[in-house]
Image (cartoon, rainbow, N blue to C red):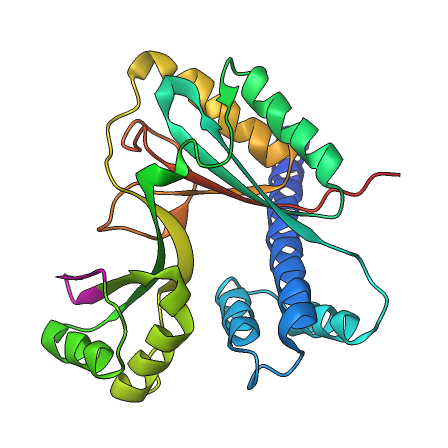
Protein backbone atom coordinates (compact mmCIF):
# COMPACT_ATOMS: atom_id res chain seq x y z
CA UNK A 1 0.00 0.00 0.00
CA UNK A 2 2.90 2.32 0.77
CA UNK A 3 4.28 2.11 -2.77
CA UNK A 4 0.87 2.52 -4.40
CA UNK A 5 0.06 5.44 -2.13
CA UNK A 6 3.32 7.18 -3.00
CA UNK A 7 2.76 6.68 -6.74
CA UNK A 8 -0.76 8.05 -6.47
CA UNK A 9 0.48 11.00 -4.41
CA UNK A 10 3.14 11.86 -7.00
CA UNK A 11 0.62 11.51 -9.84
CA UNK A 12 -1.84 13.84 -8.11
CA UNK A 13 0.90 16.37 -7.42
CA UNK A 14 1.95 16.29 -11.08
CA UNK A 15 -1.63 16.77 -12.26
CA UNK A 16 -2.12 19.63 -9.81
CA UNK A 17 1.04 21.32 -11.04
CA UNK A 18 -0.05 20.99 -14.66
CA UNK A 19 -3.44 22.52 -13.85
CA UNK A 20 -1.78 25.37 -11.98
CA UNK A 21 0.37 26.13 -15.02
CA UNK A 22 -2.64 26.15 -17.32
CA UNK A 23 -4.62 28.39 -14.95
CA UNK A 24 -1.67 30.76 -14.55
CA UNK A 25 -1.09 31.01 -18.29
CA UNK A 26 -4.72 31.83 -19.04
CA UNK A 27 -4.92 34.29 -16.12
CA UNK A 28 -1.92 36.22 -17.45
CA UNK A 29 -3.33 36.38 -20.96
CA UNK A 30 -6.71 37.58 -19.65
CA UNK A 31 -5.05 40.17 -17.42
CA UNK A 32 -2.89 41.62 -20.20
CA UNK A 33 -5.73 41.56 -22.76
CA UNK A 34 -8.10 43.32 -20.34
CA UNK A 35 -5.43 45.84 -19.39
CA UNK A 36 -4.80 46.72 -23.03
CA UNK A 37 -8.34 46.73 -24.45
CA UNK A 38 -10.70 47.18 -21.51
CA UNK A 39 -12.39 44.84 -19.05
CA UNK A 40 -15.72 44.57 -20.89
CA UNK A 41 -15.74 41.40 -23.05
CA UNK A 42 -18.49 42.87 -25.26
CA UNK A 43 -16.22 45.74 -26.25
CA UNK A 44 -12.98 43.80 -26.20
CA UNK A 45 -13.14 40.87 -28.62
CA UNK A 46 -9.64 39.73 -27.73
CA UNK A 47 -10.66 39.49 -24.08
CA UNK A 48 -13.82 37.60 -24.97
CA UNK A 49 -11.78 35.08 -26.97
CA UNK A 50 -9.26 34.73 -24.14
CA UNK A 51 -12.07 34.03 -21.65
CA UNK A 52 -13.67 31.45 -23.93
CA UNK A 53 -10.34 29.68 -24.43
CA UNK A 54 -9.84 29.60 -20.67
CA UNK A 55 -13.29 28.09 -20.15
CA UNK A 56 -12.52 25.39 -22.72
CA UNK A 57 -9.46 24.48 -20.67
CA UNK A 58 -11.73 24.28 -17.60
CA UNK A 59 -10.19 27.26 -15.86
CA UNK A 60 -12.38 28.06 -12.79
CA UNK A 61 -14.56 31.17 -12.97
CA UNK A 62 -12.92 32.68 -9.89
CA UNK A 63 -9.51 32.59 -11.63
CA UNK A 64 -10.94 34.42 -14.64
CA UNK A 65 -12.78 36.97 -12.49
CA UNK A 66 -9.70 37.62 -10.38
CA UNK A 67 -7.59 38.34 -13.48
CA UNK A 68 -10.21 40.80 -14.79
CA UNK A 69 -10.59 42.49 -11.40
CA UNK A 70 -6.83 42.85 -11.21
CA UNK A 71 -6.80 44.58 -14.61
CA UNK A 72 -9.36 47.14 -13.40
CA UNK A 73 -6.87 48.71 -11.01
CA UNK A 74 -4.27 51.27 -12.00
CA UNK A 75 -1.50 49.36 -10.31
CA UNK A 76 -0.35 45.92 -11.35
CA UNK A 77 2.39 44.01 -13.04
CA UNK A 78 3.89 45.60 -16.11
CA UNK A 79 4.10 42.85 -18.72
CA UNK A 80 5.86 43.12 -22.06
CA UNK A 81 5.94 40.79 -25.04
CA UNK A 82 9.16 39.45 -26.45
CA UNK A 83 9.84 37.19 -29.41
CA UNK A 84 12.95 35.12 -30.02
CA UNK A 85 13.83 33.05 -33.05
CA UNK A 86 16.40 30.36 -33.61
CA UNK A 87 17.33 26.88 -34.75
CA UNK A 88 16.62 23.91 -32.50
CA UNK A 89 17.74 20.27 -32.55
CA UNK A 90 17.72 18.69 -35.99
CA UNK A 91 17.72 22.11 -37.62
CA UNK A 92 14.11 22.81 -36.60
CA UNK A 93 13.02 26.42 -36.82
CA UNK A 94 11.77 27.82 -33.53
CA UNK A 95 9.81 30.92 -32.57
CA UNK A 96 9.45 31.63 -28.86
CA UNK A 97 6.79 34.18 -27.91
CA UNK A 98 7.06 35.42 -24.34
CA UNK A 99 4.98 37.45 -21.96
CA UNK A 100 7.24 38.66 -19.18
CA UNK A 101 7.83 41.39 -16.66
CA UNK A 102 11.63 41.14 -16.95
CA UNK A 103 12.89 41.01 -20.54
CA UNK A 104 16.57 41.02 -19.56
CA UNK A 105 16.25 37.88 -17.49
CA UNK A 106 13.94 36.23 -20.01
CA UNK A 107 16.38 36.46 -22.91
CA UNK A 108 18.99 34.85 -20.65
CA UNK A 109 16.68 31.96 -19.82
CA UNK A 110 15.65 31.45 -23.44
CA UNK A 111 19.26 31.56 -24.62
CA UNK A 112 20.21 28.97 -22.02
CA UNK A 113 17.61 26.55 -23.45
CA UNK A 114 19.29 26.89 -26.83
CA UNK A 115 22.93 26.74 -25.74
CA UNK A 116 22.50 23.76 -23.40
CA UNK A 117 21.00 21.72 -26.24
CA UNK A 118 23.71 22.79 -28.73
CA UNK A 119 21.27 25.00 -30.61
CA UNK A 120 21.53 28.55 -31.88
CA UNK A 121 19.36 31.52 -31.07
CA UNK A 122 19.06 33.84 -34.06
CA UNK A 123 18.23 37.42 -34.87
CA UNK A 124 14.68 38.74 -35.40
CA UNK A 125 13.38 37.50 -38.74
CA UNK A 126 15.89 34.67 -39.05
CA UNK A 127 13.19 31.96 -39.20
CA UNK A 128 9.81 33.76 -39.16
CA UNK A 129 9.88 33.94 -42.97
CA UNK A 130 9.31 30.18 -42.97
CA UNK A 131 5.94 30.55 -41.23
CA UNK A 132 2.55 32.04 -41.96
CA UNK A 133 1.20 34.07 -39.04
CA UNK A 134 -2.39 32.90 -39.24
CA UNK A 135 -5.71 33.04 -37.47
CA UNK A 136 -7.02 29.48 -37.23
CA UNK A 137 -10.58 28.34 -36.62
CA UNK A 138 -11.73 24.72 -36.38
CA UNK A 139 -15.39 23.86 -35.89
CA UNK A 140 -17.88 21.08 -36.71
CA UNK A 141 -19.43 21.53 -40.16
CA UNK A 142 -19.42 19.91 -43.57
CA UNK A 143 -20.69 22.83 -45.66
CA UNK A 144 -17.42 24.28 -46.92
CA UNK A 145 -19.08 26.40 -49.59
CA UNK A 146 -21.40 28.13 -47.10
CA UNK A 147 -18.49 28.92 -44.80
CA UNK A 148 -16.37 30.31 -47.63
CA UNK A 149 -19.28 32.41 -48.93
CA UNK A 150 -19.92 33.87 -45.46
CA UNK A 151 -16.28 34.85 -45.07
CA UNK A 152 -16.10 36.38 -48.54
CA UNK A 153 -19.31 38.38 -47.94
CA UNK A 154 -17.67 39.78 -44.79
CA UNK A 155 -14.61 40.71 -46.85
CA UNK A 156 -12.33 38.34 -44.93
CA UNK A 157 -9.07 37.53 -46.71
CA UNK A 158 -9.21 33.72 -46.45
CA UNK A 159 -5.85 32.01 -46.89
CA UNK A 160 -7.13 28.44 -46.93
CA UNK A 161 -10.14 26.36 -45.94
CA UNK A 162 -10.22 22.60 -45.41
CA UNK A 163 -13.01 20.15 -44.75
CA UNK A 164 -12.28 16.76 -43.28
CA UNK A 165 -14.37 14.24 -41.34
CA UNK A 166 -17.16 16.65 -40.47
CA UNK A 167 -14.81 19.40 -39.37
CA UNK A 168 -13.82 22.60 -41.16
CA UNK A 169 -10.54 24.45 -40.68
CA UNK A 170 -10.25 28.08 -41.73
CA UNK A 171 -6.93 29.90 -42.14
CA UNK A 172 -6.86 33.69 -42.38
CA UNK A 173 -4.23 36.41 -41.76
CA UNK A 174 -3.76 37.01 -38.04
CA UNK A 175 -4.96 40.60 -38.52
CA UNK A 176 -8.34 39.22 -39.66
CA UNK A 177 -8.96 37.18 -36.50
CA UNK A 178 -11.78 39.30 -35.04
CA UNK A 179 -13.45 39.90 -38.41
CA UNK A 180 -13.35 36.21 -39.36
CA UNK A 181 -14.66 35.12 -35.98
CA UNK A 182 -17.58 37.55 -36.11
CA UNK A 183 -18.43 36.56 -39.69
CA UNK A 184 -18.55 32.87 -38.76
CA UNK A 185 -20.79 33.55 -35.77
CA UNK A 186 -23.17 35.71 -37.81
CA UNK A 187 -23.40 33.14 -40.60
CA UNK A 188 -23.50 29.92 -38.60
CA UNK A 189 -25.06 31.01 -35.34
CA UNK A 190 -23.73 30.11 -31.92
CA UNK A 191 -21.01 27.69 -33.01
CA UNK A 192 -18.47 26.23 -30.63
CA UNK A 193 -14.94 26.44 -31.96
CA UNK A 194 -12.66 23.51 -31.28
CA UNK A 195 -9.74 25.80 -32.08
CA UNK A 196 -9.72 29.61 -32.34
CA UNK A 197 -6.27 31.06 -32.05
CA UNK A 198 -3.41 32.81 -33.75
CA UNK A 199 -0.44 30.60 -34.55
CA UNK A 200 2.67 30.46 -36.66
CA UNK A 201 2.00 27.78 -39.26
CA UNK A 202 5.08 26.30 -40.99
CA UNK A 203 5.16 26.58 -44.76
CA UNK A 204 7.15 23.36 -45.17
CA UNK A 205 7.66 20.37 -42.91
CA UNK A 206 10.10 17.48 -42.56
CA UNK A 207 10.55 14.73 -39.94
CA UNK A 208 12.89 15.24 -37.01
CA UNK A 209 15.90 12.92 -37.52
CA UNK A 210 15.78 10.00 -35.10
CA UNK A 211 19.25 10.80 -33.74
CA UNK A 212 18.08 14.29 -32.79
CA UNK A 213 14.90 13.21 -30.98
CA UNK A 214 16.46 12.90 -27.49
CA UNK A 215 17.95 16.39 -27.71
CA UNK A 216 14.69 17.72 -29.11
CA UNK A 217 12.84 16.28 -26.11
CA UNK A 218 15.37 17.87 -23.77
CA UNK A 219 14.98 21.20 -25.54
CA UNK A 220 11.20 21.18 -25.02
CA UNK A 221 11.51 20.04 -21.43
CA UNK A 222 13.87 22.93 -20.70
CA UNK A 223 11.38 25.38 -22.18
CA UNK A 224 8.57 23.85 -20.15
CA UNK A 225 10.40 23.51 -16.85
CA UNK A 226 12.79 26.43 -17.02
CA UNK A 227 10.59 29.13 -18.52
CA UNK A 228 6.89 28.46 -18.43
CA UNK A 229 4.14 26.64 -20.26
CA UNK A 230 5.47 25.59 -23.64
CA UNK A 231 2.97 24.77 -26.34
CA UNK A 232 4.21 23.30 -29.58
CA UNK A 233 2.03 23.67 -32.63
CA UNK A 234 1.83 20.46 -34.60
CA UNK A 235 3.40 21.18 -37.96
CA UNK A 236 0.46 20.30 -40.18
CA UNK A 237 -2.15 22.53 -41.78
CA UNK A 238 -4.60 19.69 -41.35
CA UNK A 239 -4.23 19.52 -37.57
CA UNK A 240 -3.62 23.03 -36.24
CA UNK A 241 -4.48 22.30 -32.61
CA UNK A 242 -1.81 23.00 -30.00
CA UNK A 243 -0.28 20.06 -28.22
CA UNK A 244 2.96 18.77 -26.78
CA UNK A 245 5.57 17.02 -28.89
CA UNK A 246 6.25 13.45 -27.93
CA UNK A 247 7.29 11.58 -31.09
CA UNK A 248 9.07 11.76 -34.44
CA UNK A 249 5.75 12.42 -36.18
CA UNK A 250 6.35 16.08 -35.51
CA UNK A 251 8.34 18.11 -37.94
CA UNK A 252 11.59 19.98 -38.14
CA UNK A 253 9.89 23.20 -39.16
CA UNK A 254 7.87 23.94 -36.07
CA UNK A 255 6.60 26.78 -33.94
CA UNK A 256 7.17 26.81 -30.21
CA UNK A 257 4.91 29.30 -28.46
CA UNK A 258 5.83 29.97 -24.86
CA UNK A 259 3.59 31.79 -22.41
CA UNK A 260 5.51 32.68 -19.30
CA UNK A 261 5.85 34.98 -16.38
CA UNK A 262 9.27 35.49 -14.87
CA UNK A 263 9.36 37.05 -11.41
CA UNK A 264 12.72 37.78 -9.83
CA UNK A 265 13.24 38.59 -6.20
Residue at x-position 84% and y-position 71%? 74
The magenta region covers 159-168
* Above or below for 218 versus 193: above
Give whichever of 100, 70 is nearer the camera. Answer: 100
Give whichever of 213, 71 is nearer the camera. Answer: 71
Is 113 part of what is drawn in magenta? Answer: no
**Residue 104 at x, y = what percent?**
74, 35
What is the quadrant of the C terminus in the image?
A: top right
219 relative to 60 in the view: left or right:
left
Give whichever of 13, 236 is nearer the camera. Answer: 236
Is 164 part of what is drawn in magenta? Answer: yes
Residue at x-position 43% and y-position 17%? 214
* Above or below for 45 versus 241: below
**Residue 182 at x, y = what percent?**
37, 81
26 relative to 123 in the view: left or right:
right
What is the quadrant of the N terminus in the image?
A: top right
Residue at x-position 30% and y-position 79%? 184
Amino acid sequence: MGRAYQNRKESMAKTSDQKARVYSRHARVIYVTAKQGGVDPDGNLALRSAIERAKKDQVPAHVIDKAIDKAKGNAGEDFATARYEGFGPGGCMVIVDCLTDNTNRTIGDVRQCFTKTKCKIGTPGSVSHSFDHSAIFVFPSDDEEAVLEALMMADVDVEDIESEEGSITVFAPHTEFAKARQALHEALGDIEFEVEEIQFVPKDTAPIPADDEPMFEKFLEMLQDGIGNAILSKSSRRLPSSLYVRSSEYCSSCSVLVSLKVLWM
